[in-house]
Amino acid sequence: MGALTERRNPRTAGIDLAGALEIVDLINAEDRTVADAVHAQRDAIAAVLSAAEEVMRSGGRLFYAGAGTSGRLGVLDASEIPPTFGAPPDLVQGVIAGGAAALTRSQEGAEDRPDGARDDLDQAGVRAGDLVIGIAASGTTPYVRGALQHARTLGARTAIIACSPPPADTLAAADIAIVVLTGPEVVTGSTRMKAGTATKLVLNTITTGAMIRLGKTYGNLMVDLQASNAKLRDRAERIVCEVCGVTAEEARDVLRAADGSVKLAIVMKKLGLGAPDARAALAREGGVIRRVVKGAPPPVGPA
């Protein structure tokens, strides 16, 4: 029968004669099924989230490996982690078949070369203790299979995200499999649609969840950010004001003393500590503010 993502969708067989509003409704109806398909894989997603946290706490890194849309989504997710959570740029990395050029233009044939994945992982410096997550909407991409198999030989942990059941040799190379059955696409084989949406939801959950577990938030506030531009400086001041109950001027002062670190500034202000002592207190508690200051952040007001 082939990959589930390559089958024809009977619900959209007449879409070529549909009006604009009907096309919108057809696509939206298919998109509404994606969240439930992701939810059905909650246990596997949680297992990968926990693996990512464990790897990062032990000094390892997370690598995505994929081709086409899947590879681009991995690179996108990886690129958003440093500005969102103040993480080092090498903590989460995306590796895509065909290299940087494939981000904006399809590199035909790159996904069919498992040896290319081996070379790319070696160039990225994947090693024992890292986590490599292969992303393959169809589940069959040779590049992804090669990446997982090579990661295993290097001593890295492995997982796969797919939207169609992968073949046995690919599953055998993955410690954990997340298989989100999104079904046939609106346009046959166009996996940038439902499969892409599902993949983005899963990636969001894995990295956001791992960052939360690593102490990158205080409640649901992004506190492990570095105030490095005007927008982030404004956000940093507002967070410190809200959490510590201080004026904007006081927030700016403590942020300067904390070298722009919101997380450090909060601990300094709440516990009356200097930067070195606040940094040591955070280190003792695994970087989790709530464990250091022993209090909840301010409640969320009415929307």
Image: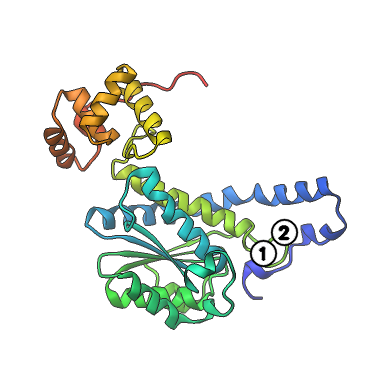
Q: Is residue 253 left or right of residue 223?
A: left
Dividing the picture into quarters, in which one does residue 16 lie?
Answer: bottom right
Colour scheme in use: rainbow
Front residue of 128 and 39: 128
Q: Nearer the viewer, mark 2 or mark 1?
A: 1
Front residue of 184 and 151: 151
Q: Is residue 295 visible to the viewer in this orientation of the structure? A: no
Residue at image x 39%, y 74%?
120
Dividing the picture into quarters, in which one does residue 291 lie?
Answer: top left
Secondary structure of the residue carrying numbered label 1: loop
Residue at image x 57%, y 74%?
107
Q: Are marks 2 and 1 in contact (CB under 8 Å)?
A: yes
- Pointer 1 local density, CA inside 10 Å: few below 14, some 14–19, many at least 20: some
Secondary structure of the residue carrying numbered label 2: loop
Give, as a three-letter code, the residue at label 1. Answer: Ser
The residue singled out by tag 1 in the image is: 190
Give, as a three-letter code, the residue at label 2. Answer: Val
The residue singled out by tag 2 in the image is: 186
Q: Is residue 237 left or right of residue 160?
A: left
Q: Position of residue 26 (x, y in %)?
A: 76, 50
Q: Is residue 48 visible to the viewer in this orientation of the structure? A: yes
**Figure disc tally:** 2
